[in-house]
Amino acid sequence: MNFLEYPDRDMLAIDLANVLADEIETCLLNHDQASLVVPGGTTPGPMFDVLCAADLDWSRVHVMPSDERWVSPDDPRSNSRLIRERLLVNRAAKAKLVPLYAEAKQPEEVLETISATLQPELPISVLLLGMGADMHTASLFPGVDGLDAALDPHAGTLGIMRPRSVPEARVTLTARVLDGAMSKHLVIFGADKRAALDMATKLPPEQAPVNAVLAGMTVHWAE
């Protein structure tokens, strides 16, 4: 794990967006397309604001969320909506969104279909993740129903998580798929998350799911 510390969050957003753009460009020099996986939540927004203006052949970039709530794509809590509104604008409007949601009451009904659409995108070219103070990443939450299956080294592409604290299920890329990315970045802010990351390195993935993907990770931190 490579740990990078920045003087402030604005500098982190600018530098990390430039790193991501450079890695995408390098991938496109050697491949027909590049897959970019990004998190939801508020953390990646400033990076998206910079990255969307990068001078890339965005028509060959396929963007997907690391995880998704099982809600309509127009729901304010949808990670795909955040990506559409914050990242797939400006020059990046030409990129293709690869969603983890399909119209169905429950994700089990369409999980195989969604998984099949993801196969051409793997392995992930460039991965950006966030982490919660509880040491979760994507929708790999400690103690959540479905975690053991998603951490299994022989797991499929997607896992279904059912947190008891929310009404809807979540679909997430499994630890195997996330950890297999060609380039991996984790962005965290604040002393509490830095302490949580330090603790995660000492715990098994069942207690600290982020530890399942830290090998070879570049961590970007600012207060």
Image (spheres, rainbow, N blue to C red):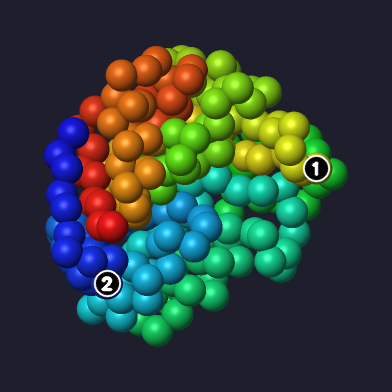
In the displayed structure, would residue 61 be above or below residue 27?
below
Residue that numbered label 1 is attached to: 167
Q: Residue at x 37, y 18 (%)?
A: 203
Residue 29 on image: x %, y %: 16, 59
Quarter assignment of residue 58: bottom left
Q: Residue at x 49, y 62 (%)?
A: 42
Give the mark nearer the N terminus: 1 vs 2: 2
Quarter assignment of residue 146: top right
> Is residue 69 rendered to the left or right of residue 188?
right
In the rendered image, the residue lying farthest to the right is: 105
> Is residue 6 rendered to the left or right of residue 105?
left
**Which element type, helix, strand or loop, lies under badge 1?**
loop
In the displayed structure, would residue 40 be above or below residue 133?
below
Report how far apart the C-alphas of labels 1 and 2 lie in the structure. 35 Å
Q: Residue at x 15, y 39 (%)?
A: 2
Can residue 56 be seen?
no
Which one is nearer the viewer's eye here, 48 or 61? Answer: 48
Q: Amino acid at mark 1?
A: Pro
Residue 100 on image: x %, y %: 60, 48
What number is the disc on residue 199?
Answer: none
Q: Name the quarter where the C terminus is drawn.
A: bottom left
Q: Amino acid at mark 2?
A: Asp
Which one is nearer the viewer's eye here, 186 or 198? Answer: 198
Residue that numbered label 2 is attached to: 10
